[in-house]
Amino acid sequence: MKTKIKEFRAKQKLTQEDLARKVGVRRETILFLEKGKYNPSLRLAHDVAKALKTTIEELFVFDKK
């Protein structure tokens, strides 16, 4: 799965730490999400999308494999 978290985060001038605080996770979790090394729970995906003022569908791109 690919994400656009970094792009949306940059548009809002948020650091990884800022976003992590907003959704209640560690900065490393945001880092792993951005690098595609961690697949979030539905709850976390929802919280991140809400914090970035977008939708899950817009934020996460599922590979068609």
Image (cartoon, rainbow, N blue to C red):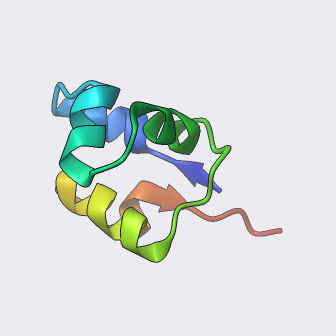
Question: Residue 20 at x, y = what percent?
Answer: 30, 40
* Image side of residue 20 versus residue 2, left or right: left
* 45 or 5, nearer to the observer: 45
Front position in the image: 24 or 40: 24
Q: Quadrant of residue 58?
A: bottom left
In the image, residue 44 above or below residue 19? below
Query: Could one spot residue 34 in this view of the protein?
Result: yes
Task: State the image coordinates of residue 27 (x, y, percent, origin top left).
Answer: 40, 32
- Report whether 11 appears left or right of 61: left
Q: Is residue 52 visible?
A: no
Question: Measured along the vertical axis of the image, is residue 7 above or below residue 63?
Answer: above
Q: Is residue 54 above or below residue 7?
A: below
Residue in view at x 19 percent, y 53 percent: 51
The quadrant holding residue 39 is bottom right
Looking at this view, name the residue that lies furthest to the bottom: 42
Image coordinates of residue 52 in percent, x first then y, are: 22, 50
Q: Is residue 1 above or below residue 32?
A: below
The N terminus lies in quadrant? bottom right
- The residue at 27%/24% (across/down) is 15
Residue 35: percent from the left, percent from the top? 60, 36
Q: Which quarter of the image is occupied by the C terminus? A: bottom right
